[in-house]
Amino acid sequence: MLRPHSCNREVRTAAILRVQLRPPTAERCGQKRTVELNPALANREKLLTTASYYASFIGLGAAAGVIGPTLPGLAEQTHSPLAALGVLFTARSAGYITGSWVGGRLYDRLPGHPVAAGALLGIAGLLALVPALPVLWVLALLMFVLGLADSALDVGANTLIVRVHGDAVGPFMTALHFFFGAGAFIAPVIAGWAISATHDIHWAYWGLALLMLPPALWLLRQRSPAAKMKGPEAAAGHANVWLVALIAMLFFFYVGTEVGFSGWVSSYAVATGMFNEAEAAYLASAFWGAFTVARLAAIPIASRVRPRYVLLVDLLGVLASLGLIVALPQSRAALWAGTLGVGLFMASIFPTNINLASRRLTLTGVLTGLFFAVGSLGAMTLPLAVGPLLVGVGPRAAMSAFGLFIVASLVVWAVLMARTAQPAQTARHGQSMQP
């Protein structure tokens, strides 16, 4: 007997996104009929869902990239010295850490797309409010809440894209983080245009707030993918503690090194006496340019090379680039080449860490949130350790510290590879992974 068109659509969508139909619909439509789905339709729907995550990450990157270019305007708006606005970054980071943990739990308990759409709408509303707040501490409080929303969307997209693509997530994950970089790139352009056209920062924030609305509505129109437990973890009922700790350490050292290097490289160049402030600023631009290009180039690599090998090459490449800078401390060419090398090899580490984790764990919202929170702790602590070295000991010591962070990452990688079995091998033998 033929089923109604609406029933067929429910069944098709459920199969595509690996979700269960609601009980009344399941009885009416027959959940088992999802096996008859045309694979071409499934791939099309997966790609449309993935595209909604990419659009969301353009917005997330833009929200992250707009603060820096508008700091002078915010200082004028709040009648505060420019140096005092550093509290905005601290508040946002604190909100991000808190939101990573809370948001992760939401994605394990609620349908993911409404949560992600809510985070996007929250970011839009908060950005729209920024130009209306003339008091610094109130603006800092808003930045804390914005950090909560940022992390909820960040954790959500990274969790949901794994649920959609499973073990084949590698290139899609790398592309996701490329679009974040694209958003961070366009935000200063939008801000500059708005400031030039209106002579204030209002439309810089209002324009980006409007940018969040289409992907939010797009997400709300699609059914959320459900988590699919891997065999060993489903049997054990929990994730391997050692495995989680080792992967979290990779996030800690990587994020701290990325934020620290990108933040201190210009100051390092000035401290060596080889660059003035204007020239040193171009080093940071070169880093982010290489970083963005490499993320795009890494997309096909992620579909052909195992994450463990991509991560190893990336870490060794970063270490070699830092070694070049340390070995030739008075060479401008070495500093340029080393900075470009660090950007190139760092670009795919973060998405590769997530891909590596998804192959060894069921990447729940809680686990993703935990990894992101630990990474944020690295971003808050490791750069702080480098600053006193740069000022009190010297530029070479500061750059050597980044090298030590990468060495620590390589040690963690080696322990992780030594103490975990390949997922495929584990599945064949029906054994749980040992720490």
Image (cartoon, helix red, strand yellow):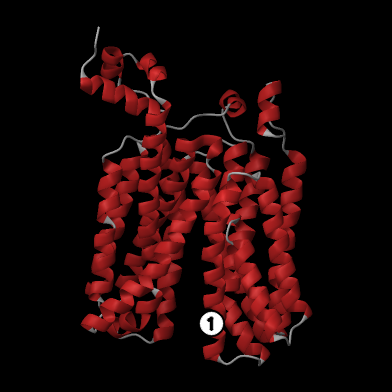
Picture coordinates of residue 225 (x, y %)? 40, 34
| Residue at the far front in the pictured view | 40
At mark 1, the secondary structure is helix
Does the rendering let one see residue 19? no
Q: Is residue 35 above or below residue 245?
A: above
Q: Type of residue at label 1?
A: Tyr
Q: Is residue 77 left or right of residue 242?
A: left
Q: Residue at x 67, y 89 (%)?
A: 272
Q: Is residue 187 above or below residue 198?
A: above
Disc 1 crowd, CA 10 A, few/some/many (<14, 14-19, 20+): few
Picture coordinates of residue 201 (x, y %)? 27, 78
Between 90 and 251, which is closer to the camera in this rendering?
251
Q: Residue at x 26, y 13 (%)?
A: 28
Q: Residue at x 38, y 78 (%)?
A: 69
Quadrant of the frame with the N terminus: top left
| Rendered image quadrant of residue 74 | bottom left
Q: Is residue 419 left or right of residue 244?
A: right
Does the rendering let one see residue 236? yes
| Rendered image quadrant of residue 3 | top left
Instruction: Quickly name the residue at label 1.
Output: 282
Picture coordinates of residue 110 (x, y %)? 36, 36
| Rendered image quadrant of residue 60 | bottom left
Q: Residue at x 52, y 41 (%)?
A: 169
Q: Is residue 240 above or below residue 262?
A: above
